[in-house]
Amino acid sequence: MSGFGVPPLTRGVKWLGGVTLAVSIAAAVFGEAGQALAAELAFVPAGLLRLHLWTPLTYTFLNRDPINLLFALLGLWLLGAALEQRWGTRRFVTFYFLTSAAGALATALVALVAPSVRGFPYFGNWSAMEGLIAAFAVLLPDAQIFLYFVPVQAKWMLPISAGITVLFMLMTGWQPYLPQLFGLGAGVLFAGGVSPGNIFLRGKVWWIDRRLRRNRLRVIRGADDDDLRSGSRGSDKYLH
């Protein structure tokens, strides 16, 4: 989706969007049966203890607000179709469900120490949408997308999206937006924006540096540092 082009409706986007639309409408118009369907599909962290293990995947198909539903489907089309063209349908759909499940499971971990989260019902595909935004920013940083009719480079959507989510958490309550925030982080990780190897390496460097500081090691210049005046670099040595 470079420039201002509009991507086609790809197969995975049509399937995900169609199921989301059908489930959301069914839950709204079928009365008690619709309410029962919504209760079965929504993700509640405490429900995992009752072995409702499918809900970290199915809550993405349920959206109870028509405006949110329309924006979610629009975002799925504009962002998802471009990524599906790049990845292929199988990888795109897998990424979609991985980010939504990661957002739900991370929220369940928070629920272990936050009682107000345990019984909170989560629904909507916004955790997956945050993952798509993160993937788009990582893989297509120079592409331009419209943010409320304003063209913005994709790389800026990552901090903008994170900032908007945090703002809503601060002003309207933090519990409803946990899957979205975790979905954004999962999108960065699964799209390759953060390499696990780099995380391990940085952690190892931090640990070594901490050990050196604990042992009160300091850096002094080697004897050949007189050559610095002539432009060459001396040898650094750690001494106790």
Image (spheres, grey):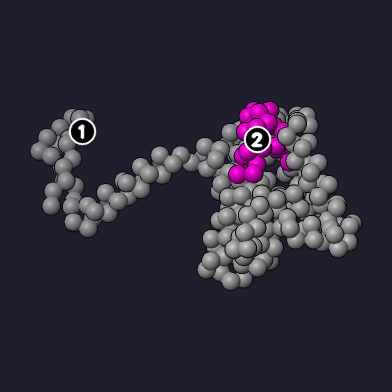
The image quarter containing residue 134 is top right
Task: Tell which of 199 and 101 is nearer to you.
Answer: 101
* Amino acid at pointer 2: Phe
Q: Residue at x 16, y 42 (%)?
A: 237
Cα separation, mark 1 vs mark 2, equals 50 Å
* Amino acid at pointer 1: Arg
The N terminus, quarter of image: top right
Instruction: Answer yes or no: is residue 136 visible.
Output: yes
Which residue extends farthest bottom?
115
Q: In the rendered view, does 55 fall on the left or right side of 187?
A: right
86 in magenta? yes
Question: Which residue corresponds to mark 2?
Answer: 92
Question: Which residue corresponds to mark 1?
Answer: 233
Q: Residue at x 66, y 49 (%)?
A: 57
Q: In the rendered view, does 80 fall on the left or right side of 30?
A: left
Q: Which residues are magenta?
A: 76-98
